[in-house]
Amino acid sequence: MDDWATQIRAGNREVLGQAITLTESNRMSDLEILDKLLHALVSDQVHPESLRIGITGVPGVGKSTFIEQFGEALIEQGHRVAVLAIDPSSSRTGGSILGDKTRMERLAQNEAAFVRPSPTGSSLGGVTRGTSEAIVLCEAAGYDRIIIETVGVGQSETAARELTDAFILLMLPGGGDELQGIKRGIMEMADLLLVNKCDSGREMLAEETANQYRKALHLFPPNPGGHEVDVMMISALEALGIQECCVALEALKSKWITNGWMNQQRSTQRVIQFRHHLQQLLFMQRMDGDEGSKKWGKLLQDLEAGSVHPFRAAREWMSERLIQGR
Ligand SMILES: Nc1nc2c(ncn2[C@@H]2O[C@H](COP(=O)(O)OP(=O)(O)OP(=O)(O)O)[C@@H](O)[C@H]2O)c(=O)[nH]1
Ligand SMILES: [Mg+2]
């Protein structure tokens, strides 16, 4: 384990990749290794300089295109950039939306970047677990700007918000937020709004859209980070407004370090992650072994047939295993 830790600290991408694979596993033995590795990596290191950035928006809005440009701009400023994805599709279909569609080939080839397109999430909330640990691993490997891409379809935003310092929402020119399928709640989570695709004659429309969002934001409760949420116009394709995004984010980071929000938010997030882990570990512990999965299958059958109330089923599952565990 010390060897893995040393390799990761030295920036060995292959070992970093293998370690991230552990975070995606549901095998107890893998998680034990991961636990030791994380402990070895974080116990003697803090990464106060890192900034974790969540990027969301409806499919096709240009998240990957933006991340590629933004990532390169950050690297030009001397940062090292890791890109991770929260992919909600993988738990449902076993496939991946983001995996085969990521257009970050250029960034992926950059020495100062690490791109990990698609985790193989489990349906038990493993997606979140994997990503939060992957962030820690990337930071230990010396990446100080961690970008999390997530598709704008609901639950994955909350997961990404719970893992990041800054949350960026990408929008398209034209149409209200109803039209763009973005829920008010997601807009409320954002620290920065970017109207993308401000090119090819859409500039005026984009300006109007940006103004609409600025007005809408005034009606929102104040952001807990104590800053005004900016609406900026960009073109990820033509690399317009990217530098301005970097400047805006660095300004937010400085502000949050000064006003204490950076630390406060991360503390809160550690507690949230602890709860997620706890739920998952409790579940996995009871699932361990053949007896566990047999019992689980039987309970699912009963639930589907409607012969047992979900609450009773949950209690039965718990007590059964507790008795066996004695
Ligand atoms: N005109 C224009 N097209 C853009 C811009 N940004 C992205 N696109 C195009 O929009 C399409 C989708 O871009 P992606 O970056 O893959 O979008 P995404 O949000 O990552 O999509 P998913 O990962 O599928 O959710 C691609 O064809 C891009 O070339 C932009 O600023 N202007
Ligand atoms: Mg994408």
Image (tube, rainbow, N blue to C red):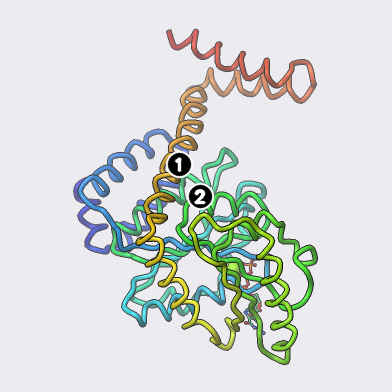
Query: 10 Å neighbourhood of mark 2: few (<14), some, or many (≥20)?
Result: many
Q: What residue did someone put label 2 on? A: 162
Give the number of marks: 2
Q: Position of residue 150 (x, y in %)?
A: 58, 60
Cα distance, mark 2 to mark 1?
8 Å
Please identify the residue farthest to the bottom as the structure is shown: 201
In the rendered structure, find residue 255 and report the number of the disc placed on it: none
Residue 260 horizontal side relative to residue 104, left or right: left
In-front residue for pair 214/60: 214
Relative to the observer, which residue lies in front, 142 or 218? 218
Q: Is residue 188 left or right of residue 277?
A: right
For image coordinates 78% across by 16% down, the residue present is 307
Q: Residues within 10 Å of mark 1 (few under 14, many from 20)?
A: some
| Mark found first going from the N terminus, 2 or 1 | 2
The image quadrant that residue 213 belongs to is bottom right
**Residue 186 in which image quadrant:** bottom right
Residue at the spot 33% in from the left edge and 57% down from the top edge = 16
Percent from the top left, x then y, of residue 255? 40, 65
Q: Secondary structure at mark 1?
A: helix
Q: Amino acid at mark 1?
A: Gln
Question: Which image quarter is the N terminus in?
Answer: top left
Q: Secondary structure at mark 2?
A: loop
**x, y percent for residue 313:** 66, 17
Compared to 178, does 28 lie above or below?
Answer: above
Q: Quadrant of residue 240?
A: bottom right
Residue 61 in the image: above or below residue 123: below
The residue under the point 44% across, 12% down is 325
| In contact (CB < 8 Å): disc 2 and disc 1 | yes
Residue bearing the label numbered 1? 273
